[in-house]
Image (tube, rainbow, N blue to C red):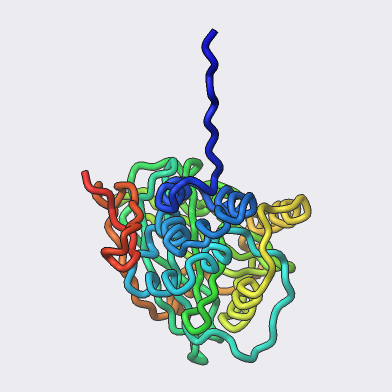
Amino acid sequence: MTNTKIITTSIEEIHYDILLQTLCHLDGQSLALASCATSQLRFVSSHPDLWRHLCLSNWPSLYHARTLPLVSSSPRRFFSDAFPFPASSSLVDHNDLPVELISAVDLYHRGIPIFSCVVETDTSSAWFRASPFLIDAQLEGSDISPEDLTLSWIVIDPSKGRAVNLSSRRPMEVRKRPWCVGETVARFTTVMDGWAVGPVVMWWKGSGDVMEVELTVEDMDGVCVSGLEGLRLVKAAMEAERKGKKGEEEAKEIELYLANKNQKEDFPCLHSCGPPRSTARGVRMQRVRRTIPLGQNDRRPLALDTNGSNGGQLDRASN
């Protein structure tokens, strides 16, 4: 009879680089859990490149020249700010509001990124703060199914390095507007302390499909709030605690908001809804927008540089 000797290896005996390359395949929640398992995993999982990799693979818009330095300065904090949902929080006062917002927008169809852009918005002027809160991005549409869309809209305060994702990720509602032939709307709404905030995606049929994505802040009756009130809500969301998913109470608030919003759109003559769409478009804020093309090469997997030959940056894996 042959005696078989079983050889075991502890996690502490695995080479650092092997652990680093293994952990880069985990999502954010799994990486955070792994860091609690052993002291060795906690040390390896604190490597900034792991969290930078998570940020850039989840949100391609962060490759933009304005956003990449903000991510690289503290990638773990950025991921912790932008990945979870913000908890409800009361509006902050008018002091120390952001004078600039950077929006990192990523739209996915069945998990594949189809549109990414960065929108820089000057929020310091009296004109902006008195106008309806509205940030928009526009692109040529394509043959996609609204129900299969997911959307991320991260708002960043570059002066403080704080960020928050104001999208529900999946659409809370997809409907055709009865008073506008050929227009379909998908709402990615979250509710915070009695305010509805989130992106709206729109399509128009006719002279080619045109898609528009805009971020709005409205009260529970579906009326746009001013830029000043919107800034107060955005700052409160950045400073609020984070949560993993929406609760039952928030789901009921979103249902109530959508019911009020749809009633106003179905019967506009019976309600005072603020400025019509054309007027709201006329007071949109000035912004600089750059659309990041997502070609085939941009979808190659990311590889970690463990040797430091490129300063700890993330590289696209070669074919």
Above or below — where is 219 with respect to 114?
Answer: below
In percent of the image, x 49 and y 57: which residue is there? 152
Q: Position of residue 169 (x, y in %)?
A: 54, 52
Q: Quadrant of the N terminus?
A: top right
Viewer-closest of 198 and 102:
102
User: Is residue 260 in view?
Assistant: yes
Q: Position of residue 232 (x, y in %)?
A: 63, 80
Residue 299 vs residue 133: left or right? Answer: left
In percent of the image, x 72 and y 66: which residue is there? 88
Residue 192 vs residue 132: left or right? Answer: right
Q: Position of residue 167 (x, y in %)?
A: 55, 59
Residue that extends furthest to the left in the rendered view of this protein: 319
Q: Position of residue 59 (x, y in %)?
A: 43, 58
Residue that extends furthest to the top in the rendered view of this protein: 1
User: Is residue 168 in view?
Assistant: no
Viewer-closest of 129 and 76:
76
In percent of the image, x 48 and y 75: which residue is there? 279
Q: Quadrant of the C terminus?
A: top left
Above or below — where is 91 with respect to 54?
Answer: below
Q: Quadrant of residue 83?
A: bottom right
Residue 277 vs residue 97: left or right? Answer: left
Viewer-closest of 14 and 213:
14
Query: Looking at the image, how many numbered discs can be counted on the residues?
Result: 0
In percent of the image, x 33 and y 47: which residue is there? 301
